[in-house]
């Protein structure tokens, strides 16, 4: 697996500094990409060796399988988060997504207010996702990369609320960071993700 570059100039966001993004993308995100590659190599080697043992209290296989979902969700969630940054915060760029948010929560402003509160309530990730079973947008929170995710839900709006995402720029003021997240939000990218996800029905 290869790392993906940021799709925007990391010095150009409002409030969220280039320093934060350099650490967040180049060190933390890239660290997850490197780790998932290492984990897959080790799983492959263990399988080929034939010495694997499936013990649920502790086994090398258990530890690697646990790390696999943590590292890979760490990669994917960060990619979805970075994907929807670098915009102008203009919801008019997302007509279909706006329509869905209005149907669900009354107005785009109410949707942002609620999604922001979910961000305040999470310890890791706040996600608006397309649920392919129910065929509707659902909000889910996740306190760790491999906890709280719903299989069958495709993320559309991903908000990272780990302290590393904002502490350098905002101290403990997560609320202000989330306000700035929406100012930097790339609605046209979110619209593209939503339109693609909405086509999946299983
Ligand atoms: Fe992060």
Image: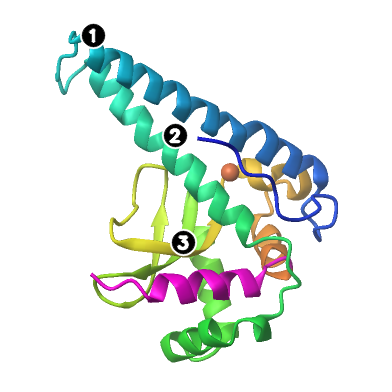
**Labels 2 and 1: the sequence-earlier one:** 1
SS state under label 3: strand
Marks 2 and 3 close (CB-CB < 8 Å): no
Q: Which residue is mark 2?
A: 71
Q: Quadrant of residue 198?
A: bottom left
Give the spatial CA distance, label 2 vs label 1.
23 Å
From the viewer's perspective, tell me whether residue 179 is left or right of residue 35.
right
Residue 160 seen in the current view = no
User: Is most of the magenta stretch helix, strand or loop?
Assistant: helix
Q: Which quadrant of the frame does ligand 1 lie within?
A: top right
Question: Is residue 32 shown left or right of residue 26?
Answer: left
Cβ atoms at labels 3 and 1 below 8 Å apart = no
Q: Residue at x 69, y 35 (%)?
A: 26
Mark 1 secondary-structure assignment? helix
To which residue does mark 3 refer? 127
Where does the magenta region start and end?
A: 184-202
- Quarter of the image with the C terminus is bottom left
């Amino acid at each position: 697996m290869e790392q993906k570059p940021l799709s925007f100039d990391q010095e150009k966001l409002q409030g969220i500094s280039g320093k934060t993004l350099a650490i967040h993308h180049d060190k933390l995100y890239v660290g997850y990409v490197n780790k998932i590659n290492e984990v897959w190599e080790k799983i492959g080697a263990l399988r080929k060796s034939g010495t694997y043992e499936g013990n649920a209290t502790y086994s090398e296989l258990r530890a690697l399988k646990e790390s696999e979902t943590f590292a890979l969700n760490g990669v994917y969630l960060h990619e979805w988060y970075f994907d929807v940054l670098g915009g102008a915060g203009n919801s008019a760029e997302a007509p279909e997504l706006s329509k869905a948010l209005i149907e669900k929560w009354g107005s785009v402003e109410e949707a942002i207010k609620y999604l922001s509160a979910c961000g305040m309530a999470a310890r890791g990730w706040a996600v608006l996702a397309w649920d392919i079973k129910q065929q509707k947008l659902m909000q889910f929170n996740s306190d760790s990369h491999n906890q709280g995710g719903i299989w069958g839900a495709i993320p559309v709006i991903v908000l990272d609320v780990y302290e590393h995402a904002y502490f350098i720029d905002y101290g403990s003021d997560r609320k202000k960071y989330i306000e700035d997240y929406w100012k930097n939000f790339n609605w046209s990218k979110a619209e593209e993700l939503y339109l693609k996800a909405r086509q999946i029905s299983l």
